[in-house]
Image (tube, grey):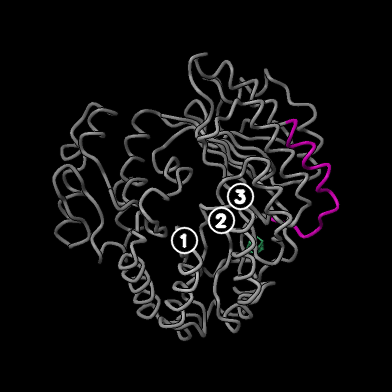
């Protein structure tokens, strides 16, 4: 299995009222933050040399997410990517994605991004209905979003994903299908659609936690979800995961690696990684990240990620141990991750990885979910049915 790199940009221009992600609006520390991230990337590149054998090629994907990476000067983002490319020996066939928002994306930035090596964009369009965008508190309008898409193509991007949010008060099924058609007409080959979640400690929680189901009934939200998948499938943008659809060949390799349980390096405050079967996280504290990235101690990291690493191990201001997965944990996690995907569980692959028959290990879970109509078994594959998609979390938890 390959390995991958995730970089977290914690800066945003303004906090969206529904957002529960770690991000801050004070960008005064961005320059220092990216200097620190360069140091951290160089550290992991050195670490990588002893982590893999010399004949292994470099990581398979790089993903800059956020936050809003396009809201900081492009020289920081591009400089960090150039460091990663040369230090890790990233090949030209590697998928390198950047998340951007229409309000902070320009043709000039786009050109700098492609020049430094980014070859895939994930644009947070969310909607092309100005009323819905206003409800979501986004900084762009529909015209701005379409212009940003034009600029992305003009800058040379051919692999562009557009993110949308469904289940927003005031949004209609017809409206979202029209929005999707507009971005497909522009040449977008990948669509992610996320149902609006009302997260605690957000302005949306105060505003909608008691009323969201009156404003958007669960039935409406579900029919929106299924209509979107049906529509995209009809257009050749095939749903390959619960929230993601793509023209075949344009599926996100980076996200697919998460569902495959691959290793990944994590760079930046708030970023999470997985190495040596250890899940680890970075503190969500920008100032302490900056100071700790300049004094990373290899022995401490080796200990935390090595066989001695255990719960509560913490390199202050930098990374902390979350959990170590045994082979049994990985076997338990396999259906949880794979059921997200349309291909689902591959019984042959399961046997190869864990030396056991899937049907023997999960006899009861499988039987009850097939009986309820949530899972289907076809040849070597077991996947969610259409009604199973509505209860995906419950089905997946059954296997944990
Ligand atoms: S732009 Fe994205 S990360 Fe930033 S506040 Fe809005 S939803 Fe959150």
Above or below, comparing residue 179 to residue 57 in the picture: below
Does the residue at mark 2 contact the one at mark 1 (Cβ under 8 Å)? Answer: yes
Residue at 45%, 83% in the rendered image: 172
The quadrant where residue 300 appears? top right
Provide the residue designation for mark 1: 192
On the rendering, which quadrant does ligand 1 occupy?
A: bottom right
**What are the residue bounds of the magenta stretch?**
23-39
Q: Is residue 115 left or right of residue 55?
A: right
Provide the residue designation for mark 3: 98
The quadrant where residue 24 appears? bottom right
Cα gap from disc 3 to disc 1, whole angstroms = 14 Å
Q: Residues within 10 Å of mark 3 (few under 14, many from 20)?
A: many
Magenta-span inclusion, residue 26: yes
Residue at 37%, 46% in the rendered image: 337
Percent x, y for residue 358? 20, 38
Q: Report whether the residue tagged 2 is closer than 8 Å to ligand 1.
A: no
Above or below, comparing residue 379 to residue 180 in the picture: above
Magenta-span inclusion, residue 123: no
Provide the residue designation for mark 2: 122
In front of the other: 26 or 151: 151
Q: Of helix, strand and loop, which one carries label 2?
A: strand
Does the residue at mark 3 contact the one at mark 2 (Cβ under 8 Å)? Answer: yes
Residue at 66%, 68% in the rendered image: 16
Residue at 74%, 57% in the rendered image: 71
Q: Residues within 10 Å of mark 1 (few under 14, many from 20)?
A: many
First in sequence: mark 2 vs mark 1:
2
In front of the other: 294 or 327: 294
| Res. 214 mark | none
């Amino acid at each position: 299995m390959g390995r991958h790199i995730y970089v977290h940009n914690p800066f945003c221009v303004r906090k969206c009222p529904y957002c529960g992600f770690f991000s801050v609006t004070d960008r005064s520390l961005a320059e220092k933050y990216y200097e620190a991230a360069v140091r951290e990337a160089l550290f992991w590149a050195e670490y990588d040399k002893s982590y893999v054998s010399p004949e292994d090629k470099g990581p398979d994907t790089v993903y800059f997410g956020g936050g809003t990476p396009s809201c900081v000067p492009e020289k920081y983002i591009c400089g960090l990517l150039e460091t990663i490319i040369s230090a890790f020996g990233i090949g030209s066939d590697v998928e390198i994605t950047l998340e951007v928002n229409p309000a902070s994306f320009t043709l000039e930035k786009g050109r700098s991004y492609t020049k430094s090596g980014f070859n895939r964009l994930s644009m947070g369009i969310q909607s092309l209905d100005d009323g819905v965008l206003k409800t979501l508190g986004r900084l762009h309008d529909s015209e701005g979003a379409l212009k940003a898409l034009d600029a992305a193509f003009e800058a040379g991007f051919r692999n562009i994903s557009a993110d949308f949010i469904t289940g927003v008060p005031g949004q209609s099924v017809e409206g979202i299908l029209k929005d999707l058609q507009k971005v497909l007409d522009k040449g977008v080959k990948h669509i992610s659609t996320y149902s609006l979640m009302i997260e605690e400690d957000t302005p949306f929680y105060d505003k909608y936690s008691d009323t969201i189901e009156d404003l958007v009934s669960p039935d409406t939200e579900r029919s929106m979800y299924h209509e979107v998948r049906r529509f995209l499938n009809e257009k050749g943008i095939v749903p390959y995961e619960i929230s993601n659809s793509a023209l075949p060949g344009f599926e996100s390799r980076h996200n697919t690696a998460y569902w495959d349980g691959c290793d990944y390096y994590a760079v930046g405050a708030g970023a999470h990684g997985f190495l040596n079967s250890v899940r680890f996280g970075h503190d969500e504290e920008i100032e302490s990240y900056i100071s700790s990235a300049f004094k990373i101690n290899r022995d401490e990291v080796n200990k935390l990620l090595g066989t001695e690493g255990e719960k509560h191990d913490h390199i202050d201001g930098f990374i902390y141990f979350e959990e170590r997965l045994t082979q049994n944990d990985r076997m338990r996690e396999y259906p949880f991750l794979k059921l997200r995907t349309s291909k689902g569980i591959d019984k042959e692959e399961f046997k190869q990885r864990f030396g056991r028959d899937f049907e023997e290990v999960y006899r009861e879970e499988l039987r009850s979910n097939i009986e309820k109509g949530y899972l289907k078994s076809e040849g070597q594959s077991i996947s969610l049915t259409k009604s199973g998609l509505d209860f995906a979390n419950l089905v997946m938890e059954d296997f944990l």
